[in-house]
Image (cartoon, grey):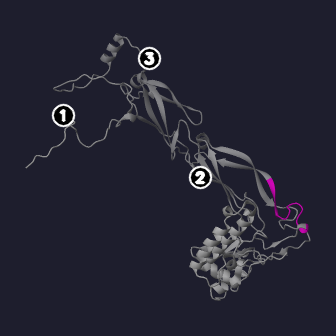
Amino acid sequence: MAEFEIDLYEVLEIERSASKDEVRKAYRKAALASHPDKVPEDEREDAEVKFKSVQEAYDILYDDDKRHLYDTHGMGAFNGSGEPGMGPGGPDLDDILAQMFGGMGGMPGMGGMPGGMPGGPRANKPRRSPNEEQKYEVSLEDLYKGKTVKFASTKNIICSLCNGKGGKERAQAKKCSTCDGHGVKQVLRQVGQFLSPSTVVCSTCSGDGQFFSPKDKCKKCKGKKTVEAKKMLEIYVPPGAKEGDKIVLDGEADQAPDQEPGDIVFHLVEEEHPIFRRSGADLTATIEITLAEALAGFSRVVIKHLDGRGVELKHPQKPGQVLSPGQVLKVPGEGMPIKRSDSRGDLYLIVDVKFPDEKWKPSPAVLASLKEILPKPGPAIQADTVDEVEYDPKGNMDEFGSNDQGGSAWEDDDDEGETAQCTAQ
């Protein structure tokens, strides 16, 4: 059954010469009359159709550019949503563009138009298929030691039955009438207040410019020219690799006819480590030692490295040396490997001195001995008045500043309740 095109002016019941103000008034009247909420239940479905037609008529006729396009070419110049673009059975876009641009001999590079490049935009098909980009999370241990990973990859490869043709051996592809064999078609898109021609891939032939009828399609690939296949791949993470590094598998992306296959590109993401932190080729970690060790010395493994080795320290290096809380010990050559060299970064160990807790109950004699052994305090602080105060041994600096009660000046308690009085002159 042949389709007929509704007249937007008849929908709003206005003349073709109606002004924008008349269009707006007619829209309000028609929208109110056809609103689905204003009609009985059994008439609501028809009212919804009418209401949508009224809205579409207003959207096109109230916009000067869209109205001009409609007056010249009808609804065929729109894509069915009230926006410029070719609908089914619409007018030739070359005619519209020629009228819009004053017969300038066609738009350069637009296939199928005067002045277009031979073969149309399909001739500019990329030489390679797109790369496949993905993230790959790696532990700091694997970045330190290096790692080889094997995995199964599913990708598209050229169909071996039709060799990427998409059709049977003696079948001939048909030229796509939608895009006239160019693989792309032109549509009008609204950019701000202007209509701009734009090129899009033809959805009928998927950009090939031709297609096979169902009976002529390749039985293996169903006309898609490629089939899925699994392949075992291997990636190597070298020692010293870091976040942001790329590992490229050349030519292992999806295959496509008449194109070189792209690459699979892995972007390394470093997983957070519970002990070590990395910066460049250097590593840092915190080691815990007791107060006795900080003062008297020790010789033991203080941390387990990323390759499983124990890192042993001997303290003191010279008699009388002590370790302080927060002190940094630099261990040269125990950081991350540096790629393409035999060098390594450094390891920075931050000292965390553990003081005795509440469970430590020394005798008065032990305390007296410690006072005698340990360095004596400095000169006493002199003050005219001395107050002995109580203190909380578990104070929290998160509460620092919480006693601010507002106000910008002191208030005298003696003045409370009094009011200022004016003295008569």
274 in relation to 362, above or below: below
Using residue 63 as the reference point, say whether residue 279 is left or right of it: left
Q: Secondary structure at mark 1?
A: helix
Mark 1 residue crowding within 10 angstroms, few (<14) / some (14–19) / many (20+): few
Is 403 on the left or on the right of 269, as rendered? left
Q: Which residue is mark 1?
A: 414
Marks 3 and 2 sit apart, C-alpha to C-alpha, by 50 Å
CA separation in Å, label 3 and label 1: 51 Å
Q: Amino acid at mark 2?
A: Asp
Please tell me in which quadrant of the rendered image residue 326 appears. top left
Instruction: Identify the mark at residue 245; answer none if there is no mark.
Output: 2
Q: Which residues are magenta?
A: 215-229
Does 97 appear above or below 285? Answer: below
Q: Is residue 45 above or below residue 247?
A: below
Q: CA distance from mark 2 to mark 1?
A: 73 Å
Q: Is residue 207 above or below residue 322?
A: below
Q: Quadrant of the N terminus?
A: bottom right
**Counting other residues with Cα less than 10 Å from the Cα at mark 2, is it few (<14), some (14-19), or many (20 or more)?**
few
Q: Earlier in the sequence, mark 2 or mark 1?
A: 2
Tag 1 or tag 3, which sits nearer the N-term?
Answer: 3
**Is there any visible trace of residue 168 in the rendered image?**
no
Query: Circle 3 is placed at which residue position?
Result: 359
